Structure formats: structure tokens, C-alpha cells
Amino acid sequence: MKSITKTAGTTFLAILLLAVIFTSCKKSDNSTPPTPGGSGAFSYKVDAGATVTVDSANATLYGANNHRQIDVYAFKGGKQVMEFHFAPKTGDQVVGSTLGSSALLTYMETPTASYDSQSGSFNLSVCDTIGKKIVGTFSFVGKQYPYTNGTTHTITEGQMTVTKLSKQ
């Protein structure tokens, strides 16, 4: 009788432990790809061609205190065409090819051909995370990833106004 009670108690604890593990795990929102939607105005030129005006753009504010970052996603024809990562502050920001120390701007020619900024300019005139509005200008030279092939595109006359901002 004692071993049956001990086995039942062990089984109950194992089930309880599994229930706690499965109910406390939450799928990370970062694994969900960005989706079209949002509002504002967003346009740019690629290699001095015609102006491209996106259909929609949205942004996400990540982090807290001094470790905050904004990601902006722009879409044309249901496909992502731009992705920006930068600090939520107004003024000029350094444009580079790494996250954290600079603004990283990416042009996506196709789902498999993306061009990460190597240099350029990025200026936010409005960065209102409470009122959910981001306004800025940008231009950059993007190099295709992987960087070994040397293919580049020059993005100019970039203007963005994003009025859809979610917070993580």
C-alpha cells in the first residue's frame, strides 16, 4: 500500500511539473514575421530610379530604459521591402552595418536578396513612442548579404512617416 501511494504521489508531482512548464512557456513574439499593415507615408528611390511608395509600414518598440530599439517594416505589394533598426531618439544617427552602435537599414529587393546599409544618413525629426508617430529621412548604400559578392544598391530620397507603433 505504501508503494502505491508513493507511486501515485510521484506521478502527480510529475504531471504537475509538466503542467507548470507548458503553461508558463510563451512563444516569443520575435519569431513571428512582420506583416503588412499600418499607416503613414514611406518612399525612396533605388539607384536613382523612379520613386517607390510603399503600401504600408509599421514599427515595434523593444526594450526598456536605455536598451530600447525601434524596428520599422515597410511593405509593397504584400512583400517586405525595407527593414530598419535604430535607437528611439530624434536627430542624426550613425548608419552602419551592425545592430546596436548604429542604425541598420536594409533594402529587400526580393525575399532572398537583401542589402544591408554600409554607410548613409538617417535623421528622425519626430520619434513619439507615446503618440505612435515616427518621421524621418534616410539614404544609404546597401551591400548584398552575404557581403562577399560585392553587389550594392544606393537608396536615396527616403522619407518615412509611420503611425502604427506597437510595444513589446
Image (cartoon, rainbow, N blue to C red):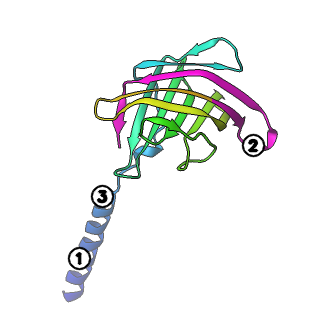
For label 3, the residue is: 24
Part of the protein shown in magenta:
140-168
Q: Is residue 157 magenta?
A: yes
Which circle marks residue 8 in the picture? Answer: 1
Quarter of the picture containing the N terminus is: bottom left
Amino acid carrying mark 1 in the image: Ala
> With 13 as the anchor, is 133 left or right in this view?
right
| Neighbours of disc 3 within 10 Å: few (<14), some (14-19), many (20+) | few
Name the residue rendered at 64%, 31% in the picture. 140
> With 131 as the anchor, is 104 left or right in this view?
right
- Of the residues tagged 3 and 1, which is closer to the observer? 3
Q: Position of residue 116 (x, y in %)?
A: 65, 37
- Of the residues tagged 3 and 2, which is closer to the observer? 2
Q: Position of residue 153 (x, y in %)?
A: 72, 28
Q: Residue 131 versus residue 91: which sits nearer the camera? A: 91
Of the image marks 2 and 1, the number of the one nearer the N terminus: 1
Say whether residue 110 is visible. no
Q: How many marks?
A: 3
Q: Assign the magenta stretch its main secondary structure.
A: strand
- Does residue 58 sit above or below 96 in this rendering? above
Which circle marks residue 147 in the picture? Answer: 2
